[in-house]
Amino acid sequence: MQRKNDHLQLVENNKAVPVWKRFFRFLIKVAVLAGFVALLWQGETYFRVNTIRVEGVGELQEEEILQAGGISRGMSIFLLGEGDILARIKKELPRAEKVEIKRELPDTIVIKIKERQPVGYVMTADGFWLIDDQGVSMEYTDEPKKEYPLISGIDGRKVIPGAPIDCPASVEAMRNFFTNWSGEGGLEIEKLDLQENYNLIAYTVDGLEIWFGDGEDMDYKLRLIEESLPYIDPATEARLDVRCGKRLVVSGSAVIKEEGKEVDP
C-alpha cells in the first residue's frame, strides 16, 4: 500500500526538475513527431503512381480503361481502392469480363484484363448488342455484325449491359451450343432462335432449319448434324430434328444422297 509520504516525495521530486530540462524534453518530443510526419510525407510522395501497365487488352483501349476506373498518374499507390475501381470498369466497359489490379512498389500499377469474346448479336429497339457464350450483353453496335449469328426470340427489354440475358432455359441451351460448336465441320450458322424455351432452332447459311431441343447432349447432337450434312442437298428445303439426341429426323423437301443415288425422304 502506497503511503502518503511517498506520494508527497514524488510530487516534490517532479517539482525539483529544472524548467529548462522539461522544456528540452518537450522539444525532443516535438522533433520526433515532426520527423515522423516528414517521413510519412516523403513516403507518400515516393509511393505515387508513375507507371501504369495494362495487359490482356484486345478491342478495349488502355485510355478508356483508365478513364472508366478513374486511375491516373500521381495517385497514392496505397489509396487506390481496388474494389471501387474494378466495379467502375465492369460497369462502364461490359466487355471486361475479369479485371485484376496489382501494385509493383514503389510506383507501378499493373491492370490485367480478360475480355469477353462475342459469339452472336441480339437486335433491340435501340440497335444491336454483341453477346458472349454465357449470354452476357457486352458491347453496343449500330450495325448488325454479320460475322456472328443473329440471336432472335429475345425480349430487347431483357438485354442489360454486362448481365446475362434473363431467359434462363433458352440461355442455357445457347451456352451449351456455343460451348460445343466450333464453327467448323461444315455447319455455318446464320441465326439462332430462342423463341421456344425448350427448343433451340438454328438456321444455316444454306437455309437448313435445325431443331436442337434443349441443351442436353449438345455435343452429340452437333456431331450427328455435322456427320449428316454431306448427305443432304443444300439446294433443297429441309428441317433436321435432333431433339431426341439419339437419332436424326429429316423432314421437308430434303434430298438425301446415298451411295451416289438420291433418295427423296
Image (spheres, rainbow, N blue to C red):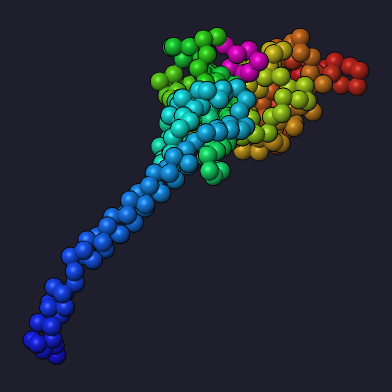
- From the image, which quarter does the C terminus lie in? top right
Residue 69 visible in the snapshot: no
- What residue is drawn where x is 40% and y is 37%? 84
- What residue is drawn where x is 69% and y is 13%? 205
Q: As displayed, is residue 260 above or below residue 9?
A: above
Q: Which residues are magenta?
A: 144-150
Q: Main secondary structure of the magenta part?
A: loop
Is residue 44 rendered to the left or right of residue 229?
A: left
Is residue 25 rendered to the left or right of residue 54?
A: left
Q: As displayed, is residue 209 above or below residue 1?
A: above
Asked if residue 46 is among those painted magenta in the image, a careful observer would answer no
- Residue at the extreme right: 260
Asked if residue 146 is among those painted magenta in the image, a careful observer would answer yes
Query: Percent from the top left, x then y, of residue 247?
Result: 72, 33
Q: Nearer the viewer, residue 184 or 25?
A: 25
Q: Nearer the viewer, residue 59 or 76?
A: 76
Is residue 261 rendered to the left or right of residue 118?
A: right
Is residue 131 rendered to the left or right of residue 78?
A: right
Q: Residue 121's quadrant in the figure?
A: top right
Query: Percent from the top left, x then y, of residue 122?
Result: 52, 18
- What residue is drawn where x is 23% and y is 66%? 21
